[in-house]
Image: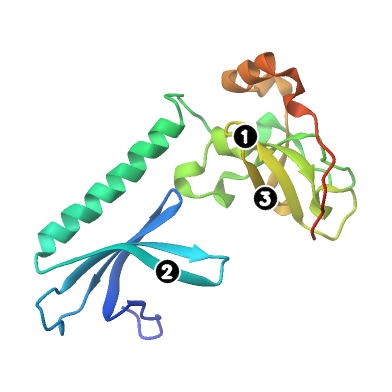
Amino acid sequence: MMENEEIRKAGEYTITQSIKIGDKELVLGEDFSNKEGLFYMVANYEELFGVVGRYDNVMVSDDFLGIVELFSKRLNAEIEQIKVDRKGIDVGVITPDMCIPDDYKKSIVGKVIVIKPQALKPEYANELYQIALATHGFGAEANSRGTKVYCKKLFSGEDGLTRRYDVIGELKPEHYPQWLKDKLKDDPSLLKVKKAKEVER
C-alpha cells in the first residue's frame, strides 16, 4: 500500500482486495486482532447516492482459502449474470468510423447515439451498452454549456445518463447491429422520444 493511499475499513476489517463487476463491488478484508480468530471477511459493497456506502452480505471466517473461494463464487455469479443479460449475443464494439461525428452545434435529441467504450465499465464496453436513444437533457441540445444527456439504452430499455463529451456520435443506420434491427422490426416506435417531464442540468 502506497504511503498516501487511503485505508478502507469495513468495521474493524481492513479492505485488502476489491473488484467492481456489474452493479457490485466485491471486497476482501482482514482483521488479525479479531478475538474470535475470524481474521478474514468477504462482502458486497454498494455506494448510495454517490456519497455514502454500505457493506452487506458479509461473511467472516478463520479460513482464508474458504473466504477467497466464496469471493470467487460471488465473482463468477456476477459474470454469469452478465452473460445471461447478453442473451447469448456475440457482441462487438462500435467505433468512430461507424458513426456520424458528434456536432455540438446540433441537437442529438431523438438520435441513436454511441457512447465511448472507455466511458463504460470494462464488462459493459460493447455495443449492447454503447447504443442509446438520446431523449433529453441540456447536454443533448445544440450549443449548450450543459453536458448531461439523458437517454434510453436500446438493448435493455433502461433509462440512462451520459455526458455529451462521452458521445462518439450518431450511429450510421448501415451499422445497426442485428439485435437493434430486430427490435425496430418488432416495435417501429422504439426511436420515438416522449416529452420529458423534467429536465436537469
For image coordinates 45% across by 24% down, the residue present is: 90
Amino acid carrying mark 3 in the image: Leu
Number of marks drawn: 3
Residue 19 location in percent, x, y? 36, 58
Badge 3 element: strand
| Colouring of the image | rainbow
Residue 133 location in percent, x, y? 72, 36
What separation in Å lies between label 3 and label 2 (alpha carbons)? 23 Å
Q: Which one is nearer the viewer's eye here, 29 or 124?
A: 29
Badge 2 element: strand
Residue 197 location in percent, x, y? 83, 48
The residue indicated by pointer 2 is 54
On screen, residue 161 versus residue 39, left or right, reads: right
Residue 177 falls in which quadrant of the image? top right
The residue indicated by pointer 3 is 161
Image quadrant in which the N terminus is located: bottom left
Amino acid carrying mark 2 in the image: Arg
Image quadrant in which the C terminus is located: bottom right
Q: Which label number is shown at residue 157?
A: 1
What separation in Å lies between label 1 and label 3 (alpha carbons)? 13 Å
Amino acid carrying mark 1 in the image: Gly
Q: Are marks 1 and 2 in contact (CB under 8 Å)?
A: no
Q: State which mark lies toward you, 3 or 2.
A: 2
